[in-house]
Structures are given as structure tokens and as C-alpha cells.
Image (spheres, rainbow, N blue to C red):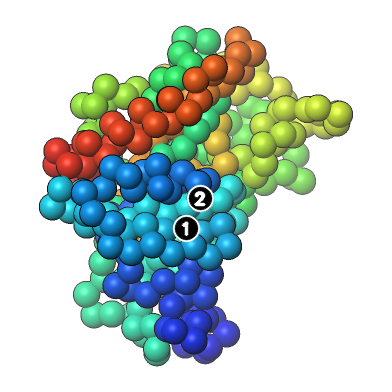
Amino acid sequence: MNNSELILNDDGSVYHIGIRPEHCAPLIITVGDPDRVPIVSQFFDRIDFTNRKREICIHTGVLKNRSVSVISTGMGTDNIDIIFNELDALFNLELNTGKPLKSPTSLTFIRLGTSGTIQANIELDSLIVAEAAIGFDNLMHYYEPSMCEHPIAVSLHSKLGMSKNLNHPYYIDGDSVLVDDCLKLGMSKGIIVTNPGFYAPQVRHLRTKNILPYDLNEFLHFNYKDSIITNFDMETSGIYGLSHVMGHRAISISAILANRFHSTFSNQTDKTVFNMIEKVTNAIKNGFFL
């Protein structure tokens, strides 16, 4: 593989994430905010490695008897593209040559993020695990465009009356075993829509006009064989899509901080995020997410 394709730093670490294979565990918690990494790793029984490069911060250690890493991705599926490709390379390529290893490693990703719901009956500060994601970004168009052909993606595209100038949505499932673990922990499940931005792409305007042929009500009332959209984010479709094409497992857990139906926002955001992190790290210690 050419040096311009798999780029290594002088110390042998992968270009953007700045780590070598021994620095990362195959069980990986992802968060958006680099300042949230130490909030997660404070629950580790031991921290063996820390590094920060740009917005990418990683702590690797042990939860009970399991090696685990927590890494920040920043916001958006463009960052997910970089970080997931480079994490996959750590475990599945011989870095000096770029050749695939004979025995591939399947990674497990747990995204801990924040989100806003569009459904009236979903309470602020609750936790939702995405059984599937619908991507309005264009990332997976470059990897597996057949995801656009899923019946739910086709039905939603038709309902919204989207023009050819807008990306066709795509649909991808999360890992069903990991989702079931979340349900056992008392979380609710839903379908998340991943958007390529926070404002207009999520039908949110401060000083701009809505030029889209749809509004939030179209998402709210969308129903395909009893499947409904529950919440919005900016990363999950990329996480699920790349995990699928690379042979990894992934789930996305969201702390609900906003309810767009009621126009309300949590008054205890830090506590809600902390409780989510505590619940998931304790679950890992107790044998969940194997």
C-alpha cells in the first residue's frame, strides 16, 4: 500500500489518531467531546495509556478484567470516517506494509452521546439505544450505496418529497445482541436519524430560512410497519455503516437532552450524561456487551 494511503507518523502511529496497535483495546467506547473521555475513564480500575492529538483523545485501561478504550471522535460522520478507518487499520493491517493480517479482529463500539427526541412521549434525561440508524449524511454512499435501497430509506425519501439535490437517506441496523443488552439495562430502543449538521439539517433555524420540502412533523409522523423515528444525532449512521462494511459490532446510546415536540431542554445535562456513563461502565464490569 502506498505511503500516501496509509499514513504513519515517525513513531509508527497512525496519522490522525496518533496511536499504535498496543495503545487500543478491541472494546471501544466513543464520545464526541474530548473532555468527556476522562469522565468515562474515571470509572476504569486502571488507566494504562493516554494520548491526545487534535480533538482525538484516547484513554485505555481495564474495567474489572476487560481491556477497554474510550476515544473522542468530535462531531459528524466525516470525523467518524477518519477515526474508524484508522482504528480498523490498527487491528487488521500490518502497518508497515498495509497488508491485511491473516486473522482479522472484530471490534466492539459503544457510542455514548447526546441527542434530541422528536416524540412527545420520550422523556428528557432518558436513554435510548438505536436499533437502527437512518443517515442523511453522504458517507456510506462512498462505501455501500445499496444501503439507500432499504425499504425504510426509500419510504422516508418518498414521504419527505426530497429533491435530487439532497442526499438519499440510507438505513443500517445496529448490533442486535448489543441492543438487547441495553434493553436489559432498562433503556428504550428507537431509530435515530443522523444529520450532516445541527441547525438546518435538523430543521432548526436561528437567522436562516427553511428551504427543505419537509419539516419536523414529517419525521414525527413517519411510520413504516410500526417503525418510527425517535431522535436525531450527527454520528450514528457512520458508526453503524462503517462497522457493517468492516465486520465490527456497534451500538449507539443517546442521553435525551432535548424534546423538539415540547420545545424543552434538560436542566441537568451533566448529571444525565454522567449517569449514562456510569450505567454503561458498570454494565461492562458485570459482563454485558461481550
On screen, residue 6 above or below 130? below
Q: Residue at x 43, y 31 (%)?
A: 273
Q: Separation of disc 2 and disc 1 at Cα?
A: 5 Å
Which picture quadrant has residue 87?
A: bottom left
Which of the marked residues, 2 or 1, is nearer the chain's N terminus? Answer: 2
Label ID, residue 57: 1
Q: Residues within 10 Å of mark 2 (few under 14, many from 20)?
A: many
On screen, residue 270 above or below 44? above
Front position in the image: 104 or 172? 104
Can residue 110 be seen from the camera position used here?
no
Tell me the amino acid under the disc marked 2.
Pro
Tell whether label 1 touches label 2 (CB within 8 Å). Answer: yes
Front position in the image: 95 or 273? 273
Q: Is residue 185 left or right of residue 38?
A: left
Label ID, residue 34: 2
Tell me the amino acid under the disc marked 1.
Cys
Q: Is residue 207 left or right of residue 255?
A: right
In x, y percent, where is residue 9? 50, 82
Label ID, residue 131: none
Q: Residue at x 58, y 62 (%)?
A: 54
On screen, residue 218 above or below 243? above
Q: Residue at x 40, y 42 (%)?
A: 39
Mark 2 lies on a secondary structure that is helix
